[in-house]
């Protein structure tokens, strides 16, 4: 395993450059340019979704790429690189790190996270594999299973994890104290202050996606904030700030 790749992430900002089908920026070319802009801004790595996107981004930037492929299988909850078919494509595309669903939910074929990691290790013994988890228990199990990095990516995105608006600082802090591999903070990080707080809670690095690379969601956040504040002002006639 290339430890230098992991060391490059320390205390840094990883930018997630993803656009799903149906979104205006859904294009490997556009995501590659978004990744280049992130590199120019000082990002230490890129998180990318999709075979073509990973290839395009690897050609555009000189940064480690955390690769994944989102694919849903009927009857199964995991959708982040859920089978070996997606792992093969992520590695073939040239990703430096492979991110997979490491929740307690069974992968297609009724495969557990531990079994899936063993399958990956058997085929790609030198691959760096990141566990996307949603709870403290899943984080501990991922560490014990032997993942190289653990990320809080799925906190709030499983039916049994906390439904909160803020980053899951409690999860970050608890896991950072317990696991001996880098703990990556991801999920609902909208501001530099929140990113810094995640690092102060013990995160090795932070991932920010929507707040940087999804303009329709950024716009919606502004619009909703303005509407809410204007409604309160019109109702109470009190200053907004």
Image: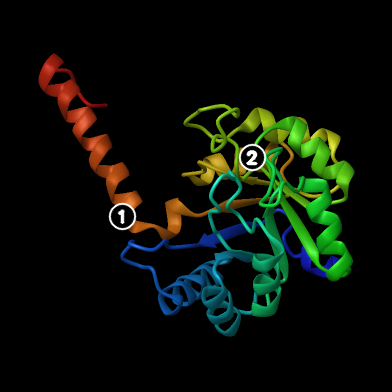
- Above or below, 79 relative to 141: below
Does residue 11 show up? yes
In three-dimensional space, the C-alpha distance between marks 1 and 2, rounded to whole angstroms, equals 25 Å
Question: Dot 1, crowdedness within 10 Å: few (<14), some or many (≥20)?
Answer: few
> What residue is pinned by disc 2?
198
Q: Nearer the viewer, residue 224 or 112?
A: 112
Kindly identify the residue that appears in the image at 34 percent across and 57 percent down. Answer: 215
Q: Is residue 20 left or right of residue 9?
A: left
Q: Nearer the viewer, residue 176 or 131?
A: 131
Q: Quadrant of the N terminus?
A: bottom right
Instruction: Answer with the quarter of the image where residue 77 lies.
Output: top right
Instruction: Answer with the quarter of the image where residue 63 lies.
Output: bottom right
Question: Dot 2, crowdedness within 10 Å: few (<14), some or many (≥20)?
Answer: many
- Above or below, 44 relative to 172: below
Q: How many marks?
A: 2
Q: Secondary structure at mark 2?
A: helix
Kindly identify the residue that appears in the image at 71 percent across and 74 percent down. Answer: 91
Q: Position of residue 4 (x, y in %)?
A: 83, 69
Q: Is residue 228 left or right of residue 144?
A: left
Kindly identify the residue that appears in the image at 75 percent across and 65 percent down. Answer: 8
Q: Secondary structure at mark 1?
A: helix
Q: Position of residue 181 (x, y in %)?
A: 84, 48
- Above or below, 191 relative to 87: above
Q: Position of residue 10 (x, y in %)?
A: 74, 56
**Which numbered mark, 1 or 2, is in the foreground of this view?**
1
Q: Residue furthest top?
A: 236
Q: Is residue 139 left or right of residue 86?
A: right
Q: Position of residue 203 (x, y in %)?
A: 71, 43
- Above or below, 181 relative to 95: above
Does residue 2 show up? no
**Could you say which disc has been placed on residue 216 in the image?**
1
């Amino acid at each position: 395993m290339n430890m230098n790749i992991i060391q490059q992430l320390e205390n840094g900002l990883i930018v997630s450059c993803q656009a799903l089908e149906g979104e205006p920026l859904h294009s490997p070319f556009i995501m590659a340019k978004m990744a280049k802009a992130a590199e120019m801004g000082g990002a230490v790595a890129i998180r990318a979704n999709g075979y073509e996107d990973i290839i395009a981004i690897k050609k555009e930037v000189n940064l480690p790429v955390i690769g994944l492929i989102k694919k849903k299988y009927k009857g199964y909850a995991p959708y982040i690189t859920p089978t070996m078919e997606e792992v093969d494509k992520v590695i073939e595309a040239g990703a430096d790190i492979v991110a997979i669903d490491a929740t307690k939910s069974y992968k297609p074929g009724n495969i557990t996270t531990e079994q899936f990691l063993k399958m990956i290790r058997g085929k790609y013994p030198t691959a760096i594999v990141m566990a996307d988890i949603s709870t403290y228990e899943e984080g501990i199990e991922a560490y014990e299973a032997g993942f190289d990095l653990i990320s809080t990516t799925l906190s709030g995105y499983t039916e049994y994890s906390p439904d909160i608006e803020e980053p899951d600082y409690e999860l970050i802090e608890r896991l950072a104290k317990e696991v001996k591999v880098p703990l990556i903070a991801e999920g609902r990080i909208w501001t530099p202050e929140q990113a810094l707080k995640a690092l102060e809670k013990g995160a090795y690095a932070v991932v920010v996606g929507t707040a940087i690379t999804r303009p329709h969601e950024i716009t919606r956040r502004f619009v909703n904030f303005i509407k809410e504040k204007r409604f309160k002002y019109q109702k109470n006639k009190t200053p907004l700030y």
